Image (cartoon, grey):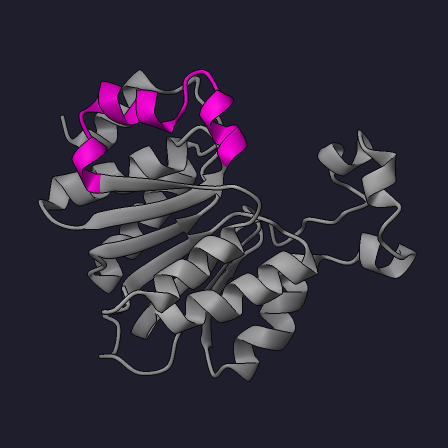
């Protein structure tokens, strides 16, 4: 049994990434020959497990994944899952005090600056967080690097978390609250930076785009 298959079997009840989505992500890792991967938003770490499992099966690579300090309070949390799966050596979890964008600036400020082949972006979701986050990730992706946007259908108005906090929701104008913020980044900023929009997977609300440069991808 592959490590990827083991994750599906052993961690089926853990939120949020499911096997069907993980297979799409694994196939993208294979197609792009990705080794150095960045993830924005891991919650308990299920998606991180799948990415690490795919890399383990390939015998290469490492994942840097970022979420808030609050993610430590999940049971199980990402450290628990990685230890149980024997994949801690493939993943560096980063816990942001306030914002993943601050942790991204630390990566940008490193000498040498880390460079990634692929980014799975599933954090923030507002225009401010996704828009600025994408511009920062762009500085960390190699030429030809790929970014996967999750939750292209997300809105403040439709968010259960914002619905439980009316005071937080009140900070947004009606038009911004109804807007699909991640989709706005996909429509406006992604082509502005010269990215090729490879695929829009509406059934799972993903968008896949590729930074200019790099060798052509195999069909």
How far across and how far down the image is residue 69, in percent? 50, 34
84 vs 155: above or below? above
How far across and how far down the image is residue 40, in percent? 46, 49
Residue 96 appears in the rendering:
yes
Residue 197 falls left or right of residue 119: right
Please tell me whether the stretch drawn in magenta is mainly helix, strand or loop. helix
88 vs 37: above or below? above
How far across and how far down the image is residue 126, in percent? 68, 54
Location of the N terminus (image quadrant): top left
Residue 20 falls left or right of residue 53: right
| Residue 88 is one of the magenta-drawn residues | yes
| Residue 6 is one of the magenta-drawn residues | no
**Foreground of the two, 175 or 8:** 175
Residue 149 appears in the rendering:
no
How far across and how far down the image is residue 109, in percent? 36, 67
Task: Give me the residue at 26% from left, 72% from top.
Answer: 217
Task: Give me the residue at 50% from left, 81% from top.
Answer: 193
**Foreground of the two, 106 or 153:** 106
**Foreground of the two, 18 or 109:** 109
Task: Give me the residue at 60% from left, 65% from top.
Answer: 131
Task: Give me the residue at 11% from left, 49% from top.
Answer: 60
Query: In this picture, which residue range is highlighted in magenta?
Result: 69-90
């Amino acid at each position: 049994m592959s490590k990827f298959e083991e994750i599906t079997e052993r961690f089926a009840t853990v939120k949020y990434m499911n096997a069907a989505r993980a297979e799409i992500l694994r196939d993208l890792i294979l197609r792009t020959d990705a080794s150095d991967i960045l993830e924005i938003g891991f919650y308990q770490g299920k998606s991180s497990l799948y990415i690490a499992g795919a890399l383990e099966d390939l015998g290469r690579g490492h994942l840097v994944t970022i979420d808030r300090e609050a993610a430590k309070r999940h049971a199980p949390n990402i450290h628990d899952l990685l230890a149980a799966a024997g994949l801690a050596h493939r993943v560096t979890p980063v816990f942001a005090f306030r914002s993943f964008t601050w942790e991204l600036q630390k990566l940008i400020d490193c000498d040498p600056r880390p460079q990634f082949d692929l980014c799975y972006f599933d954090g923030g979701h507002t225009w401010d967080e996704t828009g600025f986050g994408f511009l920062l990730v762009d500085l960390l992706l190699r030429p030809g690097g790929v970014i996967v946007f999750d939750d292209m259908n997300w809105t403040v108005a439709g968010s259960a978390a914002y619905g439980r906090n009316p005071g937080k929701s009140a900070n947004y104008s009606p038009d911004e609250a109804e807007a699909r913020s991640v989709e706005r980044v996909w429509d406006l900023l992604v082509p502005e930076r010269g990215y090729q929009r490879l695929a829009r997977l509406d059934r799972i609300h993903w968008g896949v785009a590729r930074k200019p440069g790099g060798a052509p991808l195999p069909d």
